């Protein structure tokens, strides 16, 4: 959909400068001065931290035994192996849960455990975590259930499973919101007394630490030879889930994703290979952008409008014909998801256009019976970003509202949800992306409380988006060698965005609107002309209609290849006349 909303102009945050420290970084690592300046801007304060960031290796991964209760989890799973029990892996219905469930299922089967998997279809408003798996577990004689990317708020459901003689191990990464479920073991880096130093692991990351610990124990007890277990082959799944779930690409996550991307390029998973083909993703140099914009939406479409069980099936498939058929089915699901998303987005933006007073407040809460519950997470993220406000979008069905919430860096969500917990059936997630269920009759009270709390605690200044600049760069410096040197900073993503540079340049020709909503700019500096593309900024064309005006531009350079010819172009983040 083409938004008619006026683009919010961001506040430019100047780069931090420390010439002495920049020179020390250059001398220590022999890297490009601009790369060193990016590290200064991002407040890297020690050589050791920079070394770990630039050159972290798999042996630097954190010992999984540092998880509290990891020993209990490993012992119970290996007991199931020794006694021939059946195990059920229960994953959340997004990409993080699907990849984590695939990883655990694949590994447990590999070491000889009778393993089943279950991914709930929660397209409706029923949010009963784990309850929907009890029948499946009993039917398949599963005496142990292991969650992936969910379960930390499911205390009552765990009690019911225990009464049916089903043990539960919870692996999750969401913030605890109530008393921790009483189960065999709980692995979650966000527990208050957690001893694991990486809070940023995603669900698939926690699942990977579990199989790492199991492998270590099996090798230590000489139950399996180390040559028989190759944990690297699971890193393609870790990368896919971590990127899709917007896990921070710093520290351990950065190492996991960097090596996981290499594994993706050499994946032996036939279903994943077919999915990459359907997405038209290079099988030699997969990027985080490829995963976030092409692969993840197709897998996520299952949990949004179809059957998420098929996601695990695809990733486990070893038959080429079946894998190709299922990958194509995912592609069709994604097309249908896009149609529903466009329809509901148009309805919401039409409502805001007709009711502009919605934007008089510092938070947005909208609800309707018309919106698809599986689509609202995408829409809430888009609306929050578009208007730079904490946003809750609630879909109502049969008297129950299912809500998805997104916010801005200045305002975490969970405190305000805890404060309103008496109005909610359930809630959970993270400080910056959360979900809730609520009785329809209580939505207005929640809306009032939510907006009033944020109006009182959020400054008007916070509603202005921020553009963090990393360094000033001249066109002369923008060479292919320079762009190659920037790859040291990859992979980019949450917590580690691509660098944003700035400089002054002359506009040689008025900008052209491309794709209805984007601007193409023609810029010159020191006799060198470069093209720039400003996505979503077509509504600002009138500001710079003249040619030969001087602009200050904020941008990220990239290599554009067309008809086998490569050129350097600029991804324009913002501009202003100087």
Image (spheres, rainbow, N blue to C red):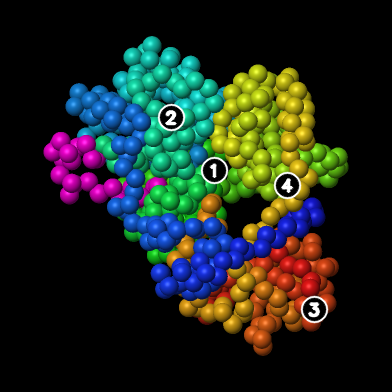
- First in sequence: mark 3 vs mark 2: 2
At x 80%, y 78%, the residue is 549
What span is colored magenta in the figure? 215-239
Spatial CA distance of label 1 from label 2 is 36 Å
Q: Dot 1: what SS? A: helix
Q: Earlier in the sequence, mark 3 or mark 4?
A: 4
Callout 3 crowding tier (Cα within 10 Å): few <14, some 14–19, many ≥20: some
Q: Is residue 550 magenta?
A: no
- Local crowd size for mark 2, using a 10 Å CA cut-off: few (<14), some (14–19), many (≥20): few
Q: Is residue 238 magenta?
A: yes
Quick check: can you spot residue 130? yes
Which is in the foreground here, disc 3 or disc 2? 2
Q: Earlier in the sequence, mark 1 or mark 2?
A: 2
Circle 1 Cα neighbour tier, 10 Å, few/some/many (<14 / 14–19 / ≥20): many
Q: Which mark is residue 193?
A: 2
CA distance separating discs 1 and 3: 45 Å
């Amino acid at each position: 959909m083409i938004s008619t909303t006026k683009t919010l102009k961001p506040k430019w945050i100047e780069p931090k400068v420390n010439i002495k420290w920049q020179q020390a970084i250059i001398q220590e690592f022999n890297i490009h001065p601009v790369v060193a300046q990016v590290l200064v801007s991002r407040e890297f304060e020690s050589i050791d931290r920079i070394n770990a960031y630039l050159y972290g290796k798999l042996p630097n991964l954190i010992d999984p035994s540092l998880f509290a209760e990891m020993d209990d989890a490993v012992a119970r799973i290996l007991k199931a192996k020794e006694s021939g029990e059946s195990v059920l892996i229960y994953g959340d219905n997004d990409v993080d849960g699907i990849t984590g469930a695939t990883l655990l299922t694949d590994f447990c089967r590999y070491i000889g455990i009778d393993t089943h998997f279950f991914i709930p279809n929660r397209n409706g408003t029923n949010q009963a975590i784990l309850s929907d798996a009890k029948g499946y577990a009993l039917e398949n004689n599963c005496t142990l259930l292991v969650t992936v990317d969910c379960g930390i708020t499911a205390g009552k459901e765990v009690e019911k499973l225990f009464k049916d003689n089903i043990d539960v191990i919870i692996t999750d990464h969401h913030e605890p919101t109530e008393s921790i479920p009483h189960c065999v073991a709980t692995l979650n880096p966000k527990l208050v007394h957690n001893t694991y130093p990486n809070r940023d692991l995603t669900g698939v990351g926690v699942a990977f630490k579990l199989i790492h610990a199991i492998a270590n124990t099996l090798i230590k007890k000489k139950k399996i030879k180390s040559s028989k277990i190759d944990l690297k082959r699971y890193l393609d799944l870790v990368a896919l889930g971590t990127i899709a779930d917007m896990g921070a690409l710093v520290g351990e996550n950065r190492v996991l994703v960097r090596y996981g991307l290499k594994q993706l390029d050499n994946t032996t998973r036939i279903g994943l290979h077919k999915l990459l083909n359907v997405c038209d993703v290079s099988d030699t140099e997969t990027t985080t952008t490829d995963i976030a914009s092409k692969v993840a939406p197709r897998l996520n479409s299952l949990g949004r409008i179809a059957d998420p069980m098929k996601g695990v099936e695809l990733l486990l498939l070893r038959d080429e014909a079946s894998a190709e058929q299922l990958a194509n089915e995912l592609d069709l699901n994604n097309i249908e998801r896009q149609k529903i998303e466009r329809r509901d987005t148009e309805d919401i933006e039409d409502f805001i256009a007709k009711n502009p007073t919605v934007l008089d407040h510092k938070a947005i809460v909208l609800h309707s019976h018309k919106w698809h519950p599986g689509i609202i997470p995408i829409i809430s993220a888009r609306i929050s970003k578009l208007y730079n406000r904490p946003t809750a979008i609630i879909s109502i069905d049969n008297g129950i509202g299912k809500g998805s919430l997104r916010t801005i860096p200045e305002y975490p969500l969970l405190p305000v949800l805890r404060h309103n917990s008496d109005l909610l059936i359930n809630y959970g997630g993270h400080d910056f992306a959360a979900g809730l269920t609520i009785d329809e009759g209580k939505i207005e009270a929640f809306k009032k409380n939510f907006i009033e709390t944020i109006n009182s605690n959020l400054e008007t200044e916070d509603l202005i988006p921020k553009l963090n600049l990393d360094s000033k760069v001249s066109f002369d410096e923008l060479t292919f060698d320079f762009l190659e040197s920037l790859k040291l900073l990859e992979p980019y993503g949450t917590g580690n965005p691509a660098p944003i540079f700035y400089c002054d340049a002359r506009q040689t020709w008025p900008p052209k609107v491309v794709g209805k909503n984007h601007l193409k700019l023609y810029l010159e500096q020191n006799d060198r002309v470069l093209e720039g593309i400003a996505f979503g900024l077509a509504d600002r064309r009138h500001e710079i209609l003249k040619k030969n005006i001087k602009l200050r531009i904020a941008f990220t350079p990239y290599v554009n290849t067309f008809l086998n010819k490569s050129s350097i172009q600029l991804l324009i983040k913002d501009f202003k006349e100087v």
